[in-house]
Image (spheres, helix red, strand yellow):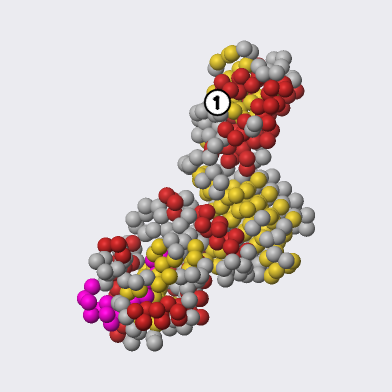
Amino acid sequence: MPLSAILLTGKRPSRPMTREYAYPQAPDLGPASLACVDVFGQSVMQRTINRLERAGVRATSVITTPDCVAFSANKNVAITITEKPADRWCAAERTLKKEAQRGVDTFLIAELGAYVELDLQDALRFHKAKGQPITCIHDSHGPLCFWLVDAAQVIASGKFPFPLDEEALEHPPIPYLVDAHVNRLSDAREFRQLVVDSFLGRCSIAPFGREIKAGVWIEEGARVHKTARLVAPVYIGRNTQVQPAAVITRFTNLEHDCNVGEGSLVADASILSHTVIGKGLDVAAALVDGSDYFHLDRNLMLRIQDPNWISDSAPLQPQVPNYLPEYEESFRRSRQLELEYSQYLSRAAGRLLEVFKGEV
Amino acid sequence: MTIGKAVIVKQLPEHLGAQQSQAFFRELAPLLASDRPRLVFDFTAVRHLDSAGVELLLQCMEEAMKRNGDLKLAAVSPQLAVILEMTRVDRLFEIFPNSADAVESFHRFPAQSLKTEAASPRSSLSSGSGKQD
């Protein structure tokens, strides 16, 4: 039975993470999604794509916004970039029709979102047994924005009913209930919960890198000073540095390219990529993304503007998604131009210096 | 500035950065130079605090301690409380929900004061929500 997946996602949140900030109003870029944020070196988005591939999904179409860089493309993943959030569902409809013409009869459509360890084969059996055009996937708390769709029935009905409002339907479809691990990732607390669950082996997410001792994972390129202490369970992402006398402990994950300053304590915290923690700080029960500091216990967010404390080391130039070669080319050309210009300025300055020295 | 029972309550400025801290410290210098200075810093107006501001707090604390005085903090917002915790400064100061309580604490007998402290003055920094720009 040919099966394809259509995944919709928004941008990586630039300032997550409370319930009110998890989906900020950004009409030009669409809703933000914590599924685009790395957990142990890989985003939930990428993990979902991998999981679907393993479950036998023939092709995956990702419909996203221009700044989503949460996954890497491969030959089985097609990317569609939409400018407006409303266009994502139109793009999904076009994809469904196109894939149906190629012989795909069933689709998994998901708006990420949630991390769901879905038993796809079991869900498909349920969907086929019920014979309904759409099967909604629920957990014990309700719908998960995952749907199994029978392409022939939906196309024959002449309408594409997504995003599906089950409550508005006269005869709502019988939902498939997931009894595996689910995390809705609707705010920073749930993101932290996913990290803790992963450390404890409650879900199938496992840290990448080398387990240097029980519960301590270190990725390639990470540097930990010999006087720093890593108290399990912790994860240190690639190219992250931990300075002398720092202590990292209690289910902390430092994602890639972070830096923890001398003598700082990071406990029960998620430090997202390109975050610099200064010297002598206590970062506890927090999620830190660049200069945004979300305190989980107090449920409040600060933007810290003092680089002595916390700062963002992300390159100013936007990261180029690797599935957009034309963008990459234009960025490469602009970087080349900048380099040539700076070399020209440098030569000119040197010449001027010589002239002035000659005059003196 | 209000003076009550020889305890001086100072309202801190809205921005407590490098420039403001220097000016504030100059303004405060005569008070800190007095014998046994008893000060309360009221954070009601403070919206922005950076490392220079924290440095100012420590400097004032040091000066007050040198002269056998004390410095207490009042009306610290939850956002600023997070910063004080993060910089490990919260454990150096007694923090009160408002300046009246802070002033009052200077007039308690030490034993009574200790008892109140045991009841955790910092618990007054209740959680809330919001952001600081």
- B75 up-or-down from A354: above or below: above
Image coords of residue A2 (percent x, y): 39, 86
Residue drawn 57% across the image and 68% down it = A203
Label total for image:
1
The answer to whether any part of residue B28 appears in the image is: no
Residue drawn 48% across the image and 60% down it = A185
Which residue is under mark 1? B98
Indicate whether residue B88 is drawn in magenta.
no
Quadrant of image for the N terminus of chain B: top right
- Give amino acid for label 1: Asn
The answer to whether any part of residue B77 appears in the image is: yes
Image coords of residue A268 (percent x, y): 63, 53
Residue B104 vs residue B72, the one in the foreground: B104
Residue A33 vs residue A316, the one in the foreground: A33
Residue B29 picture quarter: top right
- A304 up-or-down from A256: above or below: above
Residue A194 picture quarter: bottom right
Horizontal side of A191 relative to A264 (left or right) equals left
Chain for numbered disc 1: B
Residue stretch rendered in magenta on the structure = A144-159
Horizontal side of A84 relative to A351 (left or right) equals left
Image coords of residue A143 (percent x, y): 39, 64
Residue B50 vs residue A15, the one in the foreground: A15
Dot 1: few (<14), some (14–19), or many (≥20) neighbours within 10 Å? some
- A312 up-or-down from A298: above or below: below
- What SS does tag 1 mark? loop
Residue drawn 32% across the image and 62% down it = A84
Residue drawn 41% across the image and 55% down it = A23
Q: Residue furthest right?
A: A227
Image coords of residue A18 (percent x, y): 47, 50
